[in-house]
Amino acid sequence: MISERVYRALLVAYPREFRGEYGDLMVQFFRDRMRCDGGGARGLIVWMQLISDLAVSAFNEHAGGYGMGNGKPVIETDALRKIYGSIVAVDDLSMSVPRGHAFGLLGPNGSGKTTTMGMLLGLVKPTSGNFSLFGSTDGLQQSLRRVGAIVEYPSFYPYLTGRENLRYFQGIFQRGEPEDIDVLLDKVGLADRGDYRFSTYSLGMKQRLGLAFVLLGDPELLLLDEPTNGMDPAGMAEVRHLIRQLAEDGRTVLVASHLLNEVEQMCDSVVIMSDGNLIAQGSVSDILQSDDHVRLKTTNDAKAVTILSALDWIKDVRMGDGEVVVSSPRDELAEISTVLGRSEVYVIETSSGPGSLEKYFLEVTGEEASE
Amino acid sequence: MQHTLRLTKWEWFKVRRLRMPWILLVIAVLVSQLPIWVNYLAYHNETVQEVIGGGTASYSTAWDGETEITITCSDVVNDRMPAGLDQLTEWQREEFLMEVDAWRSNCEGFQADEQYRRSFTLPNSITQSIAIVSSFQPIAIGPILIMILAASIVGSEYGYGTLRTVLAGGIGRWRFLIAKLLLLLRLSSNALIVIALVALVSSLAIALISTDESGGIADSGKWSEVVLIFLKTVYGLLPFIVLGVFVTVLTTSRGVGITLSVGYFIMESILATLLRLNDTLADVADYLLVQAFLSWTTIPTELNSSETLGVFVAILGYALVLVAATAWVIDRRDIGGASGD
């Protein structure tokens, strides 16, 4: 007769991260089975079957990040809201970040990106709403052990060297082995500056150290806030490449940025935020395909806006950056051109979606191009 | 608990690379060694010797050439009766005590001299050096230094923005707080151990350089007093550690944390003086944080057992209330970025 104690002993041999999640369930299951079947060899066979089932289940759960999972979102927020006094920093944000994606959190300064990240990391208490990491709404600290994050800018101890900083955080988080640090420093291009104090680093070097930090222990989810801030063009390209590489390797990367071009190059999907609100969410290609704006350059843009504003079948029209932006399907373009021609306003050039993410962003957020 | 201890271990890795703790330690060590060397120099100063006179004088008398009783100034000032006194007849004893009484004034100088000697000979030198750091009047430097250190260590996490980095990695806020408190407790214990060791070395050095019997080893006080003052001081410093942490967590600023906690120390001393002007309120003054600490660590203690228990409970109460308040504040607050303080 195989006792429960033996099953528990067998359970110990099972990988720790699965044991905690399924252990009690398994023991309960065996207890029930033994009651029915009388335990013994048959119980052992059932145990092995269950192990096998759980292994498949756990593999799907944990290997999801490697593109083979069940597609369960890594991050899910439900009506997440944060209010500071009279300011609504994040307003009922509901978004979903799938596994194994590079995901962009786009928005102008003050749109609520950093506050959102802060809430996901337990640094900022939500006023209302919920969120889950890895499908779990409880045990945030446990979930955060699978996350590498830098919020706003890399903050490290200025009196420690880059290497010592990584060693310290590796120690307190119990992530990886000491020898990993050399590999990480090399990976982010700080191999020869690892023994310099953090206070002597340039902003770009601090960002690089931040990247090495988030990669400690090879986390499943990376949250990066403006990761290329302060970097030179070559450094920015390296970071973009690194983030793409991480996503291709199956990790989920959430990048908050206001650099639209950068996000477009790095990310598969985006959430666009403005004034704390979610404006758009989806894959970059879908968002650009859904762009129903037609852009016109005419002989008299101001007059064109006046004429088109009077038409009830045009949803929206406004002056863009040296062009007239008309919210209308592309197949209406001939009709638009005809109407304008009747008033002796002639279309010189036209373009429509899919345009760039930057144009789309500026249109939906009502921002103006800074350059 | 294992995670918290690990965190404390790594805090030590970090804090030992800071300059501030070392500077504060040097200050504490210098202050603690000051009485040892000043008293030693005073003891060997001829002018002082002449003033205090008496030195190691002893009085002896004999009867019938058979019974001789000797009493030293050390016996006199400590109210010890010499051996063999019971061999005397009653009238001889009375005569002896009368003569000793008349001679007692000669020992006043010896008493002062003995105090000097006790300050630099073991183990009393260690006891004194720990006590001087914790309760040197009018400024008890121990609590002030530990509050500065606490505010500095916790405040720097806000200033550098590293609190955000630490907490975002899954370190719980309470665990972070407890690790900091344990670290500071460890630092204060380590500092007292260093002070004790330096006092030991000082006394041994004095024993080596002394040309007479005055720099003896292990001939003043008790070693148990060393252990007692060490434990009492560590315990007494606990609420000051938490006070420094609490004020810093509340203000999220190292500078303000130091200013407010040290400011409280000074203000409380003034308040206690004012309260003591009134007989009824004088008892309240005794249980204010700083006053309780001073009476707790002063050697020799002037407290009776019930007062000792009262002060013990008061110190514990302050520590627990401040820990609870700090935990409450740190748990409710949003954690911002670097304040640059």
Image (cartoon, coloured by chain):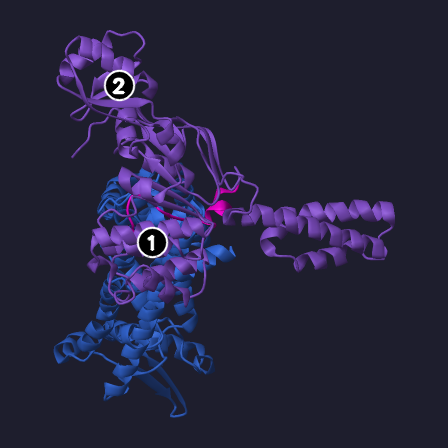
The earlier-in-sequence mark between 2 and 1 is: 1
Q: Position of residue B94 (x, y in %)?
A: 38, 75
Q: Position of residue B325 (x, y in %)?
A: 39, 40
Helix, strand or loop status at disc 1: helix
Above or below residue B99? Residue B159 is above
Label 2 sits on residue:
A326
Chain letter of the residue beneath label 2 in the structure image:
A
Q: Are marks 2 and 1 on the same chain?
A: yes
Relative to the observer, which residue lies in front, B200 or A324?
A324
Is residue B147 visible in the rendered structure shown here? no
In space, the residues marked 2 and 1 are separated at their CA atoms by 42 Å
Chain in purple in the render? A
The residue located at (31%, 68%) in the rendering is B128
Relative to the observer, which residue lies in front, A256 or A291?
A291
Check the picture and name the quadrant holding the N terminus of chain A.
bottom right
Magenta range: A139-155
Find residue A332 and report its image quarter: top left
Left or right: where does residue A212 sit relative to residue A249?
left
The residue located at (35%, 58%) in the rendering is B297
Amino acid at circle 2: Val
Label 1 sits on residue:
A211
Relative to the observer, which residue lies in front, A140 or B136?
A140
Amino acid at circle 1: Leu
Helix, strand or loop status at disc 2: strand
**Disc 2 versus disc 1: nearer the observer:** 2
Q: Position of residue B199 (x, y in %)?
A: 30, 74
Colour applied to chain B: blue
